[in-house]
Image: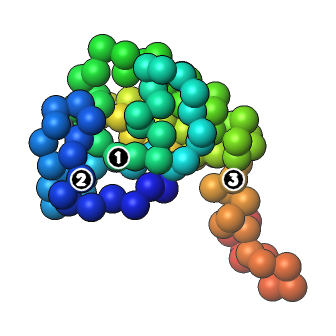
Amino acid sequence: MALVYPDMNCPFCGDRLGENESNIIGFTFLDIRDRDFEYLDDSACHRSCLSQWDKRDDFITFWNQQMRASLGPNAPELFVNDAGLVDYRDSKADSILASRKPPPGEPPELDW
Ligand SMILES: [Zn+2]
């Protein structure tokens, strides 16, 4: 994830990002060469600005492809949540379940 400072400017509206972290979304460095999206590489913006962007869906598709290419099939992916805001989620529910299994050597719980 990119380093994010309140005084950084949002590439969409030009205002500073501010202290409201719930309205800030950051992007890791993926060495993007696409002219439309490269300025979001290793950057951050307002979640509200990104969510209203007319290229939002194209960007999400593009970004998720780049993330998987760079970090593998378990890379977190962008999606639009129920509130219409862009957010991250785990691309595989399996990886969440796997992390809940007891560590090796411990007896399984009776509920399993
Ligand atoms: Zn903005």
Q: Nearer the viewer, mark 1 or mark 2?
A: 2
Residue 35 rendering spot, x and y as whole percentages: 48, 20
Residue 95 disc label: 3
Note whether ligand 1 is within 8 Å of mark 1. no
CA–CA distance in space, label 3 to label 2: 33 Å
**Local secondary structure at mark 1:** strand
Disc nearer the start of the sequence (3/2): 2
Quarter of image, res 112: bottom right
- What residue did someone put label 1 on? 44
Q: Nearer the viewer, mark 3 or mark 2?
A: 2
Disc nearer the start of the sequence (3/1): 1
Residue 105 rendering spot, x and y as whole percentages: 87, 85
Above or below, 67 against 111 in this view is: above
- The amino acid type found where label 2 is placed reads Met
Residue at image coords 18%, 58%: 7
Query: Disc 1 vs disc 2: Cβ atoms closer than 8 Å?
Result: yes
